[in-house]
Image (cartoon, grey):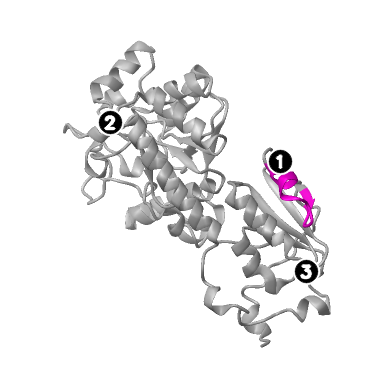
Amino acid sequence: MRNDAAYALAEPPVQNANDNAAVEIDAATPFADAERLAAGADEIAIRFEKFTDGRGFSLASMLRDRGFTGKLTARGDVLPDQAGLLRRAGFDKIASDIKPQSPRWRRRHFSHAYQPAAAGDEPAYLARARAARAALVEKLNHEYADASPEAIITAATRAFGGRIAMLSSFGTEAAAGLAVLARIAPEMPVLFLDTGMHFAQTLTYRDELVARLGLTNVIPLAPDKDELAAEDPEARLFEADTAACCDVRKVRPLARAMASFDALITGRKRYHGGEREDLPPFEFDGDVVKVNPFAALSAKEVAAIYRTLKLPAHPMAAMGYPSIGCWPCTAPAEGDGTREGRWAGQDRTECGIFDPRLKERAARTRSYRLI
């Protein structure tokens, strides 16, 4: 059944097959050879000589089942109505040799799936990978329930390899975690949410710590310019809706960055209270593993790290700021709570970046694409 108008919303645009550097293999490649090439690749392109060749689908599915987490591209003689099946097999992109203006391309536009009962199912490999990751987190929590931050970070690095990063606010307690990381894996990516609303002291402190600790891979994550222009053109959204401001400046940038990572190291601690009181060393939200190596530390133990390693304090800590975020939502605090002073007078204690629905909340800006 044809319906070009209905299909237009789902039609994948074509990308030239040479646009992305990738290890390219033929659909007829034996799986053992494909697995060997995938071991050192960030992207695998599988070339279809004929759109009827199902071996490319099998290769993709088997690579995903064996744990390949890089990009998979379908190249060659692939058609738009195969997009759903390619996705279910594990592909991320289509780079078809068939041009959009070709009558052959246009003839393959359909409004209904050939297998409608399975059209909405997620790829089987994703469900299996999710179950395996949940089991891994359970195992790690059992083994490292009372372990030191160094042991937890080492175990996480071993488990997730190059697909793990640390998130840092470069706030009042950040130096302790960054210093421990620098001793173990100074090359690990450190994600910094560069909201455009930080205190100048925080940015200066960030640069000082990076140089002092020898961190080599700090990655600033800025809000999308088009989203800011549409949702916060005057940079005053915080006056009307602080949650919406955090969403566009923090939640969505982090969600987009997490497409490259399977695990995220946080600096959260149980003594912060609220939602953090029962933090385990490892937690799985159904998508990303969050590693909390400092969860069990007390405030005194954090202070001891500062003294032992002679770490500089955030310049605003002495001014009565126990926790420091963006300037519109951070104030000095007189109480004992570490999170006091954040969103003062509001029923909020978290910005949303640790929400289990992180990627779901960012779906409008980073949805699944076949290009």
Residue 263 colored in magenta in the image: no
Instruction: Measure the alpha-carbon separation of dots 3 and 2.
Output: 62 Å
Q: Residues within 10 Å of mark 3 (few under 14, many from 20)?
A: some
Is tag 3's residue or tag 2's residue first in the polypeptide sequence? 3
Q: Nearer the viewer, mark 3 or mark 2?
A: 3
Q: Residues within 10 Å of mark 2 (few under 14, many from 20)?
A: many
The quadrant of the rendering that contains the N terminus is bottom right
Q: Which residue is mark 3?
A: 51
Vertical comparison of 151 with 189: above or below: above
Q: Secondary structure at mark 1?
A: helix
Q: Secondary structure at mark 2?
A: loop
Residue for point 24% across, 25% down: 298
Q: Is 229 left, or right, of 361 in this rendering?
A: right
Which three-letter amino acid code belongs to the residue tagged 3? Phe
Q: Is 26 left, or right, of 91 in this rendering?
A: right
| Percent of width and height locating residue 143 | 36, 31
Vertical comparison of 79 with 240: above or below: below
The quadrant of the rendering that contains the C terminus is bottom right
Q: Which residue is mark 1?
A: 36
Q: Which residue is mark 2?
A: 321
Residue 26 colored in magenta in the image: yes
Residue 141 visible from this viewpoint: yes
Question: Magenta part of the protein: which range?
Answer: 24-38
Is tag 3's residue or tag 1's residue first in the polypeptide sequence? 1
Name, please, the residue furthest toward the left: 335
Q: Residues within 10 Å of mark 1 (few under 14, many from 20)?
A: few
Which three-letter amino acid code belongs to the residue tagged 2? Tyr
Instruction: Measure the alpha-carbon separation of dots 3 and 1.
Output: 25 Å
